[in-house]
Amino acid sequence: MKTTTSSLSPAAQSPVIFGASFVKSSLTVARPSASASASASVSYSRLCCRPHCCRGLPIGIGMANQILKTTTSHFSHVESISKLSAAGKISGVNAVVLGEALASEEDELVFPNDEFSRQALVPSPKKYLEMYKRSVEDPAGFWSDIASQFYWKQKWGRPVFSENFDVRKGNVKIEWFKGGITNICYNCLDRNVESGNADKIAIYWEPNDPGSQDSLTYFQLLQRVCQLANYLKDKGVKKGDAVVIYLPMIMELPIAMLACARIGAVHSVVFAGFSAESLAQRIVDCKPKVVLTCNAVKRGSKVITLKEIVDAALVESAKSGILVDLCLTYENKSAMKRESTKWREGRDVWWQDVVPKYPTTCEVEWVDAEDPLFLLYTSGSTGKPKGVLHTTGGYMVYTATTFKYAFDYKPSDIYWCTADCGWITGHSYVTYGPLLNGATIVVFEGAPNYPDSGRCWDIVDKFKVTIFYTAPTLVRSLMRDGDEYVTRYPRKSLRVLGSVGEPINPSAWRWFFNVVGGSRCPISDTWWQTETGGFMITPLPGAWPQKPGSATFPFFGVQPVIVDEKGAEIEGECSGYLCVKSSWPGAFRTLYGDHERYETTYFKPFPGYYFSGDGCRRDKDGYYWLTGRVDDVINVSGHRIGTAEVESALVSHPQCAEAAVVGIEHEVKGQGIYAFVTLVDGVPYSDELRKSLIHKVRNQIGAFAAPDKVHWAPGLPKTRSGKIMRRILRKIASRQLNELGDTSTLADPNVVEQLIALADR
């Protein structure tokens, strides 16, 4: 086809060709001639250099015009892509292509290169827009087609989904594929074995101490899962019963999850870092038939006696009338021998003594798509953890699909997610999402900086990892330790990187891209939550350019909106509260035993929407930028910690009269915990007392919730009605003392001066 290029000199064209260096320029790009065929396809590698486009990807001119006609508020996030053929003046363009280093803070776009896009599952904006448009306008058809790729004993009925997000119209309700009969364990394992993947490695396991490893094929994993499933059935665990799993990242953790799913039991994995009291809270709430644990685990050079924590938790839960008669304990020999393990006869059973004796085949318990799959407790803005309930069918379809597209998964990939299965990331993107796709995963027991900060890259090279998914906290920690720990390893196998748990700051994104990925790996910077089940806003490698620190655009079927404090949707470039309208298959269905809290927390703040609790900014190009929590939840290293939980632990100390906790910026953890503590009258400040208060939090919640700073407070800034002015505390904690604002409404304005004076003590 013919194009009019007289306004572009050869010198002006060269900066925008794939593989060439990109320099600042101010160009005028001409439209294609009127005689050109509207349906023809053209590569805009020479014509399109708008900051929001996908330079060099094959884009049909007719597609752009069509999108302009059909664009509605559903597609406002991709309006910029719809202007690909609309020529105009371009200024201040700063971008690179995969393979080129992000040279400076001014570089703000990373384009997929031709080769990557050509092989990608979603190779262009056009393909994304086609799929996204259908997912929003015909969600029943879109998700039914995907769900049909899995095994269903019985197909779902009509309607495919039903929903009510508006509390003004009755109880909030979400259902997907109801009436469909399936089993997620069958789809993870049996289906892969039957399709010819029996001998494919399902799990590579790397222990804490270097020098050894283990692995399971899909067939071997199925056998191990069946043995545990048969044992649990023999002990009376049946469909709908809860099983608490308190295990570290050994292979028995995903085995336990899958075994529960196979027999229809509801697993509740508790991160093996929570204290006995926190574990007891979860046991009391879900009333499990069995607790699964191991005697101990090594993290780095430290041994953590998990069985003793479980023992204390079971004593505590018994005080509330919840008795657990069986504690199945795995002997983790590298951490502790069984003869050193405290034992209660009649309740405690060694895993290795009983489970291997059971048959390696186990009948599947077929369940309805809306039957519960798992409970996962997450911190809220009140002291009581929330039991997020996910059901089977929609979660299965959504996690598998998000994994496939967000990581551009290929059957030859070796995938490693560094998350623990005690968090939602470990559920969706260590266990279920990858195995549903027949992937080979790496499970790592230890600490990522043990014995030194090169451990991650040693593992990457050892297993030829192609997809590496981790948290910004780890990225910042390794970045601080220096490039040499990374560059001593080739890392040539890496193809796609990923980020999860919190917004990643642009400087860490650039280091991750340049140093870890060698400037050749796109980064899937994912935004999602325990409640969403899977990715909501995420890059699709190969489809569009990335901006360091931005989660980019929504996944298929997800309709994010930014609203103001009154709940009105804001269009275009803006900042506000991130909500979602209309359901998606992976959405959680309720909070266990407390549907009223479910509605109050997530659906009453902005009726008609799911409220994420996060702030968000949308830039002029439609890209989404997460700005963090807007409620009283602190995101520490990707762990959501309710301020009320930490405050409750502090005031349980006999010498603490009152406490107020806020989040502050932390160069490694993203956010740190800053505690203002008022002591009982007559008790002096001391370093010993500070340590004792921190120890109290560690014992009640876990080490990850320990305050980074304890600020002695003679009093707290309160209104006359007694409300603590956390806004002022945040400003003091972050030393923004010139931004304290109006303090005249405080009952005692002098408290602020006292707190400032004590800031450095």
Image (tube, rainbow, N blue to C red):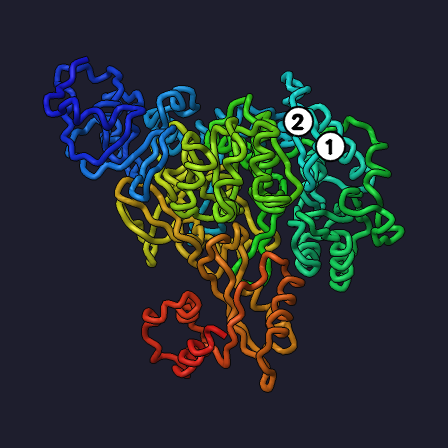
Q: Would you say 351 lies left or right of 668 here? A: right
Q: Is residue 29 above or below residue 332?
A: above
Residue 577 picture location, percent across and down: 37, 53
Q: Secondary structure at mark 2?
A: helix
- Residue at 57% in and 34% down: 416
Q: Nearer the viewer, residue 332 or 317?
A: 332
Q: Secondary structure at mark 1?
A: helix
Q: Nearer the viewer, residue 141 or 32?
A: 32
The residue that disc 1 covers is: 225
Q: Which residue in the rendered view is the most extreme toward the left?
A: 6
Residue 136 picture location, percent across and down: 38, 34
Q: Residues within 10 Å of mark 2 (few under 14, many from 20)?
A: many
Q: Would you say 57 lies left or right of 236 here? A: left
CA distance separating discs 2 and 1: 9 Å
> Which numbered disc flags the more N-terminal residue, 2 or 1?
2
Q: Residues within 10 Å of mark 1 (few under 14, many from 20)?
A: many
* Contact between labelled residues 1 and 2, with CB atoms less than 8 Å apart: yes
Q: Which quadrant holds residue 739?
A: bottom left
The residue that disc 2 covers is: 189
Q: Would you say 367 lies left or right of 307 here? A: left
Residue 603 picture location, percent across and down: 45, 53
Q: Which quadrant holds residue 431?
A: top right
Looking at numbered disc 2 in the image, what kind of residue is underneath it?
Leu
Q: Please state, as top left, top right, bottom left or bottom right, where the N terminus lies in the image.
A: top left
Q: Would you say 125 lies left or right of 533 here? A: left
Q: Which quadrant holds residue 546?
A: top left
